[in-house]
Image: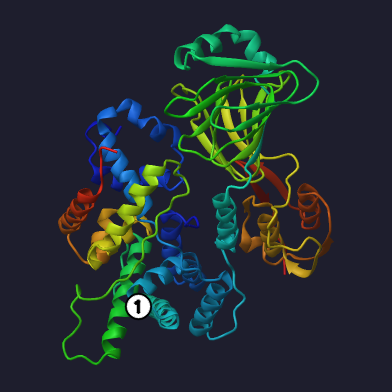
Amino acid sequence: MRPRITPDEAQKLWNDYQSGDMYALANIMQAYYSDLFHWGLRLHGEREFVKDCIQDMFVNLWKSQQSARAGSLPAAIVSNVRSYLLVALKTRILRELSKKHVTHQSMLSDEYSFSVEFSSDLRLIDEEHEIYQVRKLEGVLNNLSERQKELIYLRFYQSLSFEQIAEVMNLSRQSVYNLLQKSLGSLRKHYDVSS
Amino acid sequence: MKPYESYTIEDFLEDESFRKWVQGQGTQEIFWLSFLEKYPHQRDAFRQAEALVRAANVAEEWIPEKEIRAEVERFIEQVAGAAPHLQIGFSDDDEEPEVRSGFWKRWLIAAAAVLVLGAGIGWYYYQNNDLEPRIATADTSPPNLVTTRNDSDKPLKITLSDGSEVTLSEQSSLRYPSEFEDGARVVYLTGEAIFSVKKQGQTFMVHTGKVVTKVLGTRFVVSAFDEDRNITVQVQTGKVSVYVDKPSENEVKGLIITANQAAVFEKSANQLSKTVVENPEKLPDNPVESILKYDEVPLPVILRDIEKSYGIPVQFDADSFWTCKITVAFSDESMYDKLSILCKTVSAGYEIVDGQIVVSGQGCSK
């Protein structure tokens, strides 16, 4: 995985963007593009669709900044740029999808699909039985519920803190913790500690 | 200090430093390697969290840098309504996925981690501490240690009990157990040797004085000459981790070094630092052609090519150098020659900092 820009660098760019620097926003887009793209594909697997959603999201961010500066809208206060963008992209994708599939009820926030395939990183393991354990865990991970997988994905692929995961999944921190407990419970059943 | 004593799996999972260490990007290598010695009762939680991080890996959905740039330009066109001249402040990441995936591919094949552990235990260290390391290691090393010394003028081949082969250079000696026991495979080297390590359960470690090299690949060279004051580990391809044995409070812990990087341990100062090897070689499967002609090309683009060719990170301010357009043809100049030529052209300078090349200068006016 490529190194990311630091949250401080991102925050600085974000401030520049909010004071009207278009290139700062373009830099943010460039820096986080592959993270956002990867995240978007988990929510809906069409590349072009995801790219369009990312594009629209950034154009919208720029417009809302202009409105904020014109005084018609409050400026968005953002504590972490990356998780803010992940939330914004998710919202946009789910909204676009609900438009696409003409349903009468609005999409419930916990009914979206999330697809990810875990495949163990075995690079740094030497021990035969450890490889076996990890492979087995991988199987269990892939059989978790979509919400549980989303949590694991956000923690380990996007390296969000539990706090930020709560924000992105629109859950309380306690619910994130409970969800994690539940996932660990099913993992534990399959992990043979004695070996 | 965090309450490691009572860490739960969840705490390990939330700990950024732990996660990074498991994923091989950590800076606290030593701490986590010795964690279970300090907190043996935490074994289960630690192992489970570790296995979980490994299992939770997700393949990267690769999107070419070009495609990203096109999208960013599309964005700028939309909001500015004009064709932009893009200033990329974080182009540091340019093409990185390519370099990385290439790197990992090599590492997975683990065909040949070639490393030179140069320059020695040094007279400085030995003159002052001659007895100390022996006594110290005698306590911890297995009792059945064999010492082989090569006093001939030809390299000497030794086969270890695990099937690994060691070619011991002249005037060098290797101490190793006649049988490796459970746990890590550990050998002690004075002088120089080439190791072909059998891929196997336990980690393979080479101790040279205060420095330990942990093998993450399979074939490498370790050399240690008495005249030198530094212990140097150089990696040509692959990946090794180098650390100071039993570091005291304010000593540097450990480093992971990759292609064309070197770790230098300065014995007098007890300093372990990262630098770049003396003669960087192009990576065997680098994507950049060997003869390169640039015609009015922005400096950042050329610097990225150098980065890709040698696998060494190059840091610079893309904004200020973007307007420097360069026309040059490279063939077989060394990496440093290329950098000198480029820097002279734009009145810039470069230095090696922490295993990376840092280019700085005023940039060019349009």
Q: Position of residue B101 (x, y in %)?
A: 55, 59
Relative to the observer, which residue lies in front, A179 or B348? Answer: A179
Give the image location of residue A16, x and y in percent.
Answer: 45, 65
Image-based side of A98 in relation to B205, left or right: left
Q: Is residue B15 visible?
A: no
Numbered disc 1: secondary structure: loop
- Chain containing the residue with disc 1: A
Is A163 in front, or is A18? A163
Q: Residue at x 44, y 79 (%)?
A: A47
Q: Which quarter of the figure is the C terminus of chain B placed in?
A: bottom right
* Above/below status of B318 relative to B204: below
Of B150 and B361, the residue lying toward us: B150
Q: What residue would you read off at disc 1?
A: A44
Residue in the image at 44% along x and 50% along y: A122
Question: Could you tell me the amino acid type at mark 1?
Answer: His
Q: Residue at the spot x=55%, y=54% of the render? A: B104
